[in-house]
Amino acid sequence: EDQVTQSPEALRLQEGESSSLNCSYTVSGLRGLFWYRQDPGKGPEFLFTLYSAGEEKEKERLKATLTKKESFLHITAPKPEDSATYLCAATKAAGNKLTFGGGTRVLVKP
Amino acid sequence: ETGVTQSPTHLIKTRGQQVTLRCSSQSGHNTVSWYQQALGQGPQFIFQYYREEENGRGNFPPRFSGLQFPNYSSELNVNALELDDSALYLCASSLVGNNEQFFGPGTRLTVL
């Protein structure tokens, strides 16, 4: 059965304290690995898609990387506005379902 | 460009009732997926619609059903509501053949 697991469940950071979020996946025939940001009570906001091992993508203070078994979301010098839940998801075929992890709740304190 | 919209924002129902949730796709997108997100958990795939037909279904009972209309908007219907159906219901649109799905703001359903 396809499975996506995120760790840690929660992360408290001081402003400027860099850290990494982990997403491990067991998905045969991975088509794409996705990262989303979700603010409380709102829908997930698309951040990145990664397709192959070794691929990296960056957006402002966020950088996502992919290996054959896991993906990392690195947050460099975070600011309080980076506080959110970060969701990782995997898909096996184009346009098909996303299998999500449980998310990592990130709180950045000033 | 118009993003994904959902209505209503919030809904309160009692056990045994039926509910219909609505979703308008992002402009140009022809595929709609529905997800259920319980509090503190990641979204769970319910089903996907393409060309007005169901195109994949998750582990949800038949009392969860849907429709897609010619303008690509969609409805999620849930019959015989149970307490565990209380959740945030998310709609996501995409282009067929493209993995990237874009989500609406969700409908918060509370079943009492």
Image (cartoon, helix red, strand yellow):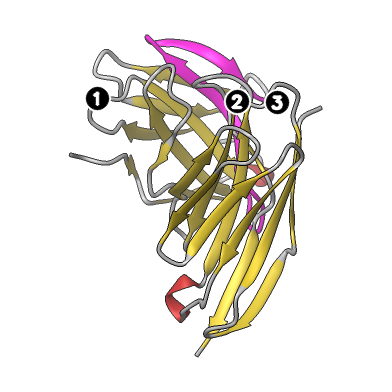
Tell me where residue A6 appears, x and y as whole percent. Answer: 72, 53
Question: Which residue shows up at 42% across the image and 14% down it?
Answer: B50
Q: Which residue is mark 1?
A: B28
Chain ID, mark 2:
A
Q: Residue furthest left?
A: B1
For the residue pair B1 and A72, the one nearer the viewer reads as A72
Question: Which residue shows up at 75% across the image and 59% down it?
Answer: A7
- The segment highlighted magenta reads B38-60
Q: Which residue is mark 2?
A: A31
The residue carrying pointer 1 sits among few (fewer than 14), some (14 to 19) or many (20 or more) residues within 10 Å by Cα, namely: few
The residue carrying pointer 3 sits among few (fewer than 14), some (14 to 19) or many (20 or more) residues within 10 Å by Cα, namely: few
Chain ID, mark 1:
B
- Residue A18: say if magenta: no
Q: Is A29 above or below relative to A12? A: above
State which mark lies toward you, 3 or 1. Answer: 1
Compute the Cα span from label 3 to label 2. 21 Å
Q: Which residue is mark 3?
A: B59
Compute the Cα span from label 2 to label 1. 23 Å
Tell me where residue A3 appears, x and y as whole percent. Answer: 77, 36
